[in-house]
Amino acid sequence: MAKRDFYEVLGLSRGASAEEIKKAYRKKAKELHPDRNADNPNAEAQFKEVNEAYETLKDADKKAAYDRFGHAAFEQGMGGGPRPGGAGFGGQGDFASAFSNVFDDLFGDFMAQQGAGGRQRATRGSDLRYNLRVVLEEAYSGVHRTIKVPGSVACEVCNGTGAEGGAEPATCPTCSGMGKVRAQQGFFTVERTCPTCGGMGQIIKNPCKSCGGAGRVERDRSLSVNIPAGVETGTRIRLAGEGEAGLRGGPPGDLYIFIEVAPHPIFEREGMNLHCRVPVSMTTAALGGEIEVPTIDGGRSRVKVPEGSQSGKQMRLRAKGMPGLRGGGNGDMFIELAVETPVKLTARQKELLKEFEELSEENNPEGSSFFTKVKSFWDGMKS
């Protein structure tokens, strides 16, 4: 069977530019790839035909010869093009070579970019996390802390290069500094990390004895940290460049300090506000009076208790709460009254309370209202 015109195979007209040829080839190669056409017995032959056409037309000299003499330009020694059983598509090995060419043309640029980007001549150090617990008073006023952080620091002997005497690493001879090597496996071209340099693209001929060529050593560090006023549990503080040292002179990572504010025995925090539950005697709640309450700044405030106060009553002390982390003033402090029932009464106290009970039928409005509702409920059940 006579060979089809190469331009016809690629769906082009004569005079097509190199870019048009490449674009048409990519489209055809994807359409006719055997993996995508398992149910088409002619797919492999068509795929070979497309590759043969492209191999000729992509080369300027071969294209000029083909435009002048057609297929005859590559027959009987007239050119260097593919021949049956030769360097063309005559057997299984030729098809593997063709597929390799497809892979190179379609993905070569991408793999080259990946290879260049994959080189890691100097690796950034890891970020570190440090959990720091503070008490509420420290969160209120801010605090200065010195912490010990375990991690890696740059090797002082080799200045972080990993090479003896601080010498510069040499280009890896296996991958020529790319960090990756390519190998032919059947139909596929496989790219993998260079086994010699581990993807670094460089090797150290004489590793530093102190760090073993890593450019960093393990060492605890003491850091001075300022905890600002207003922090709360979950606040994160970033210290740039205070993480682990980079590998082979790479930049260090960051240190993240996560704050936890310990529970307080007196105050309960809610955002910028504070809550304080204060017990008051039954007589103070009934007759009214004043109580003294603590504030988070270490001071004291006197609060007036209204006559007839009940448990749960709240009173606000403005601006006596926590400061805002980024300014904006202070929150408030809420006092919640807890009316105490006296315990361990003497005989005389019991006698006076009984007498008081007999005289206070009209003094318990909430109780009277409740039992009125209960009586109505029971009456309704009966009916």
Image (tube, helix red, strand yellow):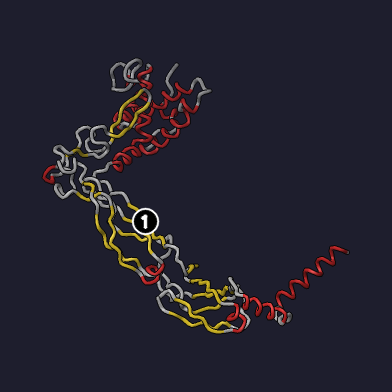
- In terms of image quadrants, where is residue 114? top left
Q: Which residue lies at the image location 45% right of the left edge and 34% below the top edge?
A: 27
In the image, 284: left or right of 239?
right
Q: Going by the picture, which residue comes out furthest to the right?
A: 383
Q: Going by the picture, which residue comes out furthest to the left?
A: 165
Q: Which residue lies at the image location 32% right of the left edge and 56% below the top edge?
A: 255
Viewer-side residue, 236 vs 58: 236
* Residue 153, x across and y down, in percent: 22, 50
Q: Residues within 10 Å of mark 1 (few under 14, many from 20)?
A: few
Q: Which residue lies at the image location 78% right of the left edge and 68% below the top edge?
A: 374
Q: Secondary structure at mark 1?
A: strand
In the image, 218: left or right of 63?
left
- Image vertical order of residue 378 relative to residue 281, above or below: above
Numbered marks: total = 1
Whether residue 120 appears in this view of the structure is: yes
* Residue 212, x across and y down, in percent: 18, 40
Whether residue 312 appears in this view of the structure is: no
In the image, 238: left or right of 32?
left
- Image vertical order of residue 143 relative to residue 83, above or below: below
Q: Going by the picture, which residue comes out furthest to the front?
A: 347
* Residue 86, x across and y down, in percent: 32, 17
Q: Which residue lies at the image location 40% right of the left edge and 71% below the top edge?
A: 140
- In terms of image quadrants, where is residue 144? bottom left
Tell me which amino acid carries mark 1.
Asn
Viewer-side residue, 247 vs 74: 247
Viewer-side residue, 49 vs 5: 49
Residue at numbered disc 1: 131
